Image (tube, rainbow, N blue to C red):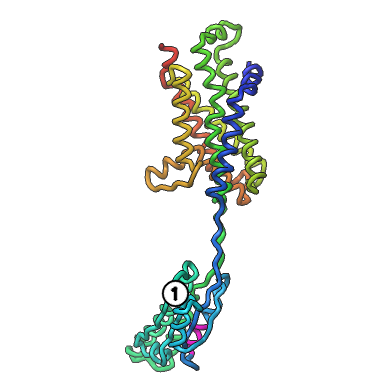
Amino acid sequence: MTVSDLRQRLRDRSVLLYGLVVPLALMVVFDLTLGDQEVELEPLTVAVAAPEGDVLADAVVTVLGDLGDLDVTVEEVSADAASARVADGEAGLAVIVPAGFTDAVTAGEGPVVEVVEGDGTGLEGDVVLSVLDAVLDQLAAGALTAAAGAEAGLPAEVVASLGQAALASAPVLTLEEGEAANEQLSASGALVAGQAGLFLLFTVGFGVLGLVAERETGTMPRLRSMPMRPGLIVAAKALVSYLLGVGATAVLLTAGSVLFDVSFGSPVAVAALVLAAVAAATSLMFVIARVARTAEQANAVQSIFALVLGLTGGAFFPLSATGLAGQLLDVNPVAALTRGLGITSGGGGLADLGVPVLTMLGFAVVCVVLARLVPDRGEAR
């Protein structure tokens, strides 16, 4: 029965359409519109006016010229020239350090560093301003510590050492290129995983939901009259769903990897995720088969479940939530599949897939129990 059903489903163009053609087409469309968008920091010129020979002013200039991955060119000019260069568009930022900066800082007088920001400095300007703000905060902390020590009557050498310790207590804010967490797929990877999970919920319906069609067309009594246990009929439909789901998901992930240059990591670990995801999706079809009176109702309910689980599972765009909503999102099998593929793409193996695999298998168990408890509306008709 399984072979016969499987052969029949493979001849059905709807299986090919929903299982492969539509999801691959959507992957291409969404990748073209929502694919990876890398942010590249542009070089930035900063005009700095600093008093000559001022120790702390020189430290500020040094920090601004050494921001790691952000290419900053520091031009030391006069105060008037600094603002003019920004006005002329020759520099993105002007930083004007007042005369007597070191003395004012050590005396706790709170000197004001003037900043002029040009148009369109964007993210690069924000980064430089953040670093400058962190440097000034650190200098202020050192000055405040020294002032407090002096007010307490500490010896001058002790006050000086306290101020130096405060200045060196924390590193100045630095810029480093970040990397995505191991459990986070790239935009293209998340798109492939999400679409594979979404259309898995359609593909598995071609097997189990055949029970509704058999019942509606009147062939179910004939099947039950055959010399075999009734449970084998259900098992055969479930096996058809499972095989179709595994095959379609494997093809989608493989094709997505090739088309969008995405690596999901260990094939063995990915296979474990696919098997668990297909089990969860197939079990959901049993619930639908119990509550639907007709094939049309079954298809409608299946579409609703697929779209809701796909949308909340991140098939089109990532969703995040806290509290009860976040817990509900966590048990979504589509989201669990995507999380699992994020782990494997980051180098994780079978031992690291406990949470997503157990989530999907738990979902499958709950659905099977529900299918046993929910009255069969088709049989009651």
In this view, the residue in front, 167 or 7, is 7
Residue drawn at 57 percent across, 9 percent down: 223
- For badge 1, the amino acid type reads Gly
Q: Residue at x 43, y 17 (%)?
A: 293
Whether residue 322 is visible to the viewer of this picture, yes or no, is yes
Please provide percent x and percent y for residue 29.
56, 43
Residue at the image point whose x is 48% and y is 21% from the top: 289
Classify residue 251 by image quadrant.
Answer: top right
Residue drawn at the location 39% of the way across and 93% of the way down: 155
Where 200 falls versus 113 (above or below)? above
Residue 350, located in which quarter of the rendered image?
top right
Residue 371, horizontal then vertical, whole percent: 46, 23
Residue 56 belongs to magenta span: yes
Please provide the residue range marked out in magenta.
55-61
Q: Residues within 10 Å of mark 1 (few under 14, many from 20)?
A: some
Q: Position of residue 167 (x, y in %)?
A: 46, 82
The residue carrying mark 1 is: 118
| Secondary element type, mark 1 | loop
Rendered view: 122 above or below 358: below
Measuring from the top left, give residue 211's x and y in whole percent.
52, 17
Whether residue 126 is visible: no
Q: Is residue 321 magenta?
A: no
| Placement of the N terminus among the 4 image quadrants | top right
| Tally of numbered discs | 1
